[in-house]
Amino acid sequence: MYDIIVVGGGTSGLMAAVQAAEYGAKVLIIEKNGSLGRKLLLTGGGRCNVTNNRPSNEIIAHIPGNGKFLYSAFSQFDNYDIMSFFTSNGVTLKEEDHGRMFPTTDKARTILETFQARITDLHIDVWYDCSVKKLLIVDGTIKGVRLANGKDVSARCVILATGGKSVPKTGSTGDAYAWLKKASHTITPLFPTEVPLTSNEPFIQQKILQGLSLRGIGLSVLNEKGKAIVTHEMDMIFTHFGVSGPAVLRCSSFVYHQQQKTQHQNVTLSLDCCTTLSKEQLTTQLHHIQKTDGAKQLKTVLKTFIPERLALFYAQQLNLDANTALSKLDEQTIHRIATLLKHFTFTVNGSLPIEKSFVTGGGVSVKEISPQTMMSKYVDGLFCCGELLDIHGYTGGYNITSAFITGTIAGRSAAMYFPQ
């Protein structure tokens, strides 16, 4: 008999188990893999971006998928508490660009070993290579779990931390969705997010720009009226199947939702290669070059703003000879050049599959989970945390922050929960 069973020894499950045990609970982790923290070891490029050093409201703003659900959780345990947890356990952290926090060892294993040490210190039991078959629920109250081998394990609380369906090689195969559906929970449609986008545009299919990286561009997802739904200023890269890079990953969930809204396969993106200049300022600069150095070829002028491969491609898009002197271009053509530099549109038709994404969009409806405790509103003593929930954020330490915080709240709440 355990106080708490944590199903899943990943990011949120490890934190849930440790926090519950620190609050005095007898805890068992049931892990389907032969080792803990498989996905944790992959985070942050293998360096584990443990959180982000920004104010809570900014963190939540970087979690476009139901981030507001976390306000109550943040009031109990926030990103600064995550940092304190690790530093108090001997991990020194460092801050990198955009507030990302890493262990100074630059190794995700440092974070995993910290959890493993706490598991040993707190006498938390771990069953490896062990799969759960179903939840044991009686009259709306959790009683434990049934294992794949038919054995029943009793507990007064169960915390589900099984992850989503992204990176299935780590064990995230969506097992808990079926269990929760049987418990009357709503599972919102799953979709890949923080994922490269695919395109049928001829220039993509012909691989004209394949491998071309662009730095500090603005990428917007447009609605059916041509208005920007969201814009991200970061880097991107053209690939053999479409586009990728940080700006693209951040736009991916908005592309999915736009597709669902319009029931159209294609969504239009707009690329701004000159984010520091307005279209008017860009036009003025082009006019100035035309007057003072008009003999310069179009491709030479474009290369001052964009890489040469893109300059040649843009000249083609304008039906212009890239070797044409700027002095020979009329007013309307100068405006067309400025417009293209600020607003090159192309369509995407989807993304790589959910198994290729690092984050799962959709999941257990947060309307059915208590934001103060992470407990199910339908089953007493059943808690959910991490990527299993319908919460998703951008890369940069936001998803792992959500996982650590929801895991903490679930663990502490379960430790303090005693059924009537």
Image: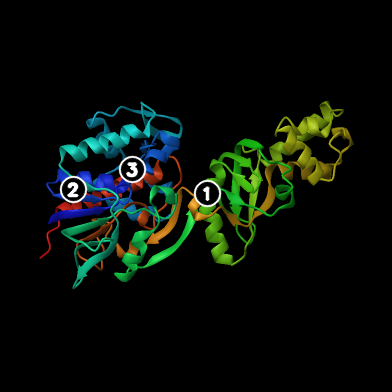
| Residue reaching furthest to the bottom | 139
Kind of element beneath mark 2: helix
Q: Earlier in the sequence, mark 2 or mark 1?
A: 2
Asked if the residue under mark 2 is in contact with the one under mark 3, i.e. CB atoms within 8 Å, the reply is no
- What separation in Å lies between label 2 and label 1 (alpha carbons)? 33 Å
Percent across and percent down for residue 410 are 24, 53
Looking at the image, residue 33 lies above or below residue 189: above
Residue 20: numbered disc: 2
Residue 403 shown left or right of residue 393 in the figure: left
Query: Split into 4 quadrants, where in the image is the C terminus?
Result: bottom left
For this view, does 105 lie left or right of residue 86?
right
- Disc 3 or disc 1, which is closer to the eye? 3
Per the image, the residue denoted by label 3 is: 37
Quadrant housing residue 99: top left
Q: Is residue 318 above or below residue 391?
A: above
Is 409 situated above or below 151?
above
From the viewer's perspective, is the residue at label 3 or at label 2 nearer? 3
Label located before the other in sequence (3 or 1): 3
Instruction: Name the amino acid, label 2.
Output: Ala
Nearest the eye: 315 or 404: 404
How far from the left and from the top, in percent, is residue 292?
Answer: 82, 26
Mark 2 neighbour density, 10 Å: few (under 14) some (14–19) many (20 or more)? many
Between the residue at mark 3 and the residue at mark 2, the CA separation in whole angstroms equals 18 Å
What residue did someone put label 1 on? 195
Amino acid type, mark 3: Gly
Q: Residue at x 56, y 41 (%)?
A: 245
Q: Position of residue 67 (x, y in %)?
A: 38, 52
Please tell me which residue is depicted at 75% across the width and 36% down the height of the picture.
311
In the depicted view, which residue is nearer to us: 163 or 261? 163
